[in-house]
Image: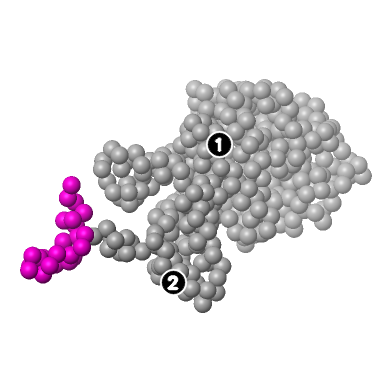
């Protein structure tokens, strides 16, 4: 593979741009007789004028040798063994050069029938390590011994051309690790680059391989895709390349059936809303994200359960929550600390729909009210109609002061559709003379009148 060495005076990376802890790791490895390089995204982002999120190190020292050298280290990973050097909250990831498989022991290297790597603890030299990396823009090594950059496969050139290019045969590399297809999308949107045609060509055909990725790993990948300010762009590219359906089958089925329906509108609203909050440094949470995305699959499942079993609307809604969340967790493992509040948000939708009276004051105190209210507003935008009116009522109530809220509640009581008891009284027949209705209370006479005929 092509190697370009860029000397210190020919590139823009300065040690001032590298974290102090990463430098400590690099220098200790180097002074102990090992080769040590800053690698991948840290080098790439500095060259692009961006602030790196992580600083990863690669070396010819084995994980066991790294652990002996750093008392503040721990070994992690099963698929590929890594060392994490811990400096308080800052963690520097250190990997050993990866090598080619060849004929190796299954204890250190193993793949499944589809070609996906299950175990990959094969060590080698830097040239082999570069060939094992995914994209050329990540095959960049900053050498702490002489401050030069080793660029493999034309990585520097692809940075300049703003091109995402896979190293090696695309189909083989995607089969080794299908998540690389998602990484191609994420890098393209994050770095404002284009995926090279040969790199993009096999993605649609191989997209179903994502179903075989452990759901826990997919949860982490989804966070990177949708919680970094590029949710809308990532969704659109994933949809075009067929990568969204394997991750969100319930949502995709509804959008396929109704491309311009409520589900599609909600999805676009959630993505743009998430990007806006990230740009404003506001918190974003997986609980709200999944509650909003899965609302219409939940609604459909609740309707199906009510039709099949005869359960009440409320009971069917509660039963559907478990079904929808369980099915989603087959592809993306949503931790309980997020799935439980997501269900709270869903359950509050029913209360929001029928609480435009004095109960609204109590509902305001619910810890998940704000998230549920935000979802109701998105539903109002997607559906309009009655839900739009309910959302508008709640918006006026939430944005009002205490006195205004009292006035809003009083006015809502006067409306014909706000007071259920008033409606029931209007439907009752005139009471009979006392002599004819002795022993029959007004309370139990109303239902008899309503059920006749």
- Asked where in the image residue 175 lies, by quadrant, the reply is top right
Q: Position of residue 153 (x, y in %)?
A: 77, 29
Residue 286 visible at all: no
Q: Which mark is residue 260?
A: 1
The stretch in magenta equals 429-453
Q: Is residue 134 left or right of residue 323?
A: right
Q: Which mark is residue 15?
A: none
Of pointers 1 and 2, the one earlier in the residue sequence: 1
Location of mark 2 (residue): 410
Q: Is residue 215 left or right of residue 93?
A: left
Asked whether 48 or 82 is in front, the reply is: 48
Q: Position of residue 3 (x, y in %)?
A: 81, 30
Residue 384's place in the image compared with 168, above or below, is: below
Q: Position of residue 375 (x, y in %)?
A: 51, 54
Asked whether 185 or 14 is in front, the reply is: 185
Helix, strand or loop at mark 1: loop
Magenta-colored stretch includes residue 445: yes
Asked whether 337 or 13 is in front, the reply is: 337
Q: CA distance from mark 1 to mark 2?
A: 38 Å
Residue at position x 30%, y 39% in the image: 307
Residue at position x 80%, y 30% in the image: 154
Residue 91's place in the image compared with 213, above or below, is: below
Magenta region, mostly helix, strand or loop?
loop
Helix, strand or loop at mark 2: helix
Residue at position x 32%, y 64% in the image: 422
């Amino acid at each position: 593979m092509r190697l370009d060495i860029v000397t210190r005076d020919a590139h823009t990376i300065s040690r001032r741009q590298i974290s102090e802890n990463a430098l400590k790791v690099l220098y200790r490895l180097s002074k102990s007789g090992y080769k040590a390089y800053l690698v991948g995204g840290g080098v790439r982002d500095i060259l692009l004028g961006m602030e790196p999120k992580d600083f990863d190190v690669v070396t010819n020292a084995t994980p066991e040798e790294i652990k002996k050298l750093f008392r503040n280290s721990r070994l992690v990973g099963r698929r590929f063994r890594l060392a994490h050097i811990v400096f308080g909250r800052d963690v520097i990831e250190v990997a050993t050069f990866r090598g080619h498989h060849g004929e190796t022991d299954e204890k250190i290297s193993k793949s499944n029938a589809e070609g996906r790597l299950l175990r990959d603890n094969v060590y080698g030299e830097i040239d082999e390590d570069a060939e094992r990396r995914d994209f050329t823009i990540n095959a960049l090594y900053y050498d702490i011994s002489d401050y030069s950059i080793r660029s493999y496969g034309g990585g520097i050139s692809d940075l300049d051309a703003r091109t995402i290019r896979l190293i090696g045969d695309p189909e083989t590399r995607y089969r080794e690790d299908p998540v690389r297809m998602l990484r191609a999308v994420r890098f393209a949107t994050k770095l404002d680059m284009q995926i090279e045609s040969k790199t993009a060509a096999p993605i649609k055909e191989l997209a179903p391989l994502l179903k075989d990725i452990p759901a826990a790993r997919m949860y982490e990948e989804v966070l990177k895709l949708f919680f970094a300010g590029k949710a809308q762009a990532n969704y659109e590219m994933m949809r075009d390349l067929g990568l969204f359906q394997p991750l969100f089958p319930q949502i995709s089925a509804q959008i396929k059936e109704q491309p311009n329906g409520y589900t599609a509108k909600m999805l676009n609203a959630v993505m743009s809303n998430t990007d806006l909050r990230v740009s404003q440094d506001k918190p974003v949470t997986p609980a709200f994200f999944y509650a909003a995305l899965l609302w219409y699959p939940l609604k459909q499942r609740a309707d199906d359960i009510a039709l099949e079993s005869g359960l009440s609307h409320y009971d069917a809604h509660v039963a559907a929550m478990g079904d929808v969340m369980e099915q989603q967790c087959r592809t993306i493992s949503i931790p309980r600390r997020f799935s439980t509040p997501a269900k709270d948000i869903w359950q509050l939708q029913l209360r929001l729909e029928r609480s435009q009276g004095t109960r609204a004051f109590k509902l305001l105190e619910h810890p998940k009210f704000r998230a549920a209210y935000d979802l109701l507003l998105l539903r109002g935008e997607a559906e309009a109609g009655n839900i739009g009116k309910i959302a508008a009522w709640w918006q006026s109530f939430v944005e009002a002061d205490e006195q205004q809220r009292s006035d809003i509640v009083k006015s809502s009581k006067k409306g014909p559709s706000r007071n259920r008891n008033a409606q029931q009284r209007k439907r009752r027949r005139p009471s009979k003379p006392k002599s004819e209705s002795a022993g029959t209370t007004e309370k139990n006479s109303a239902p008899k009148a309503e059920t006749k005929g």
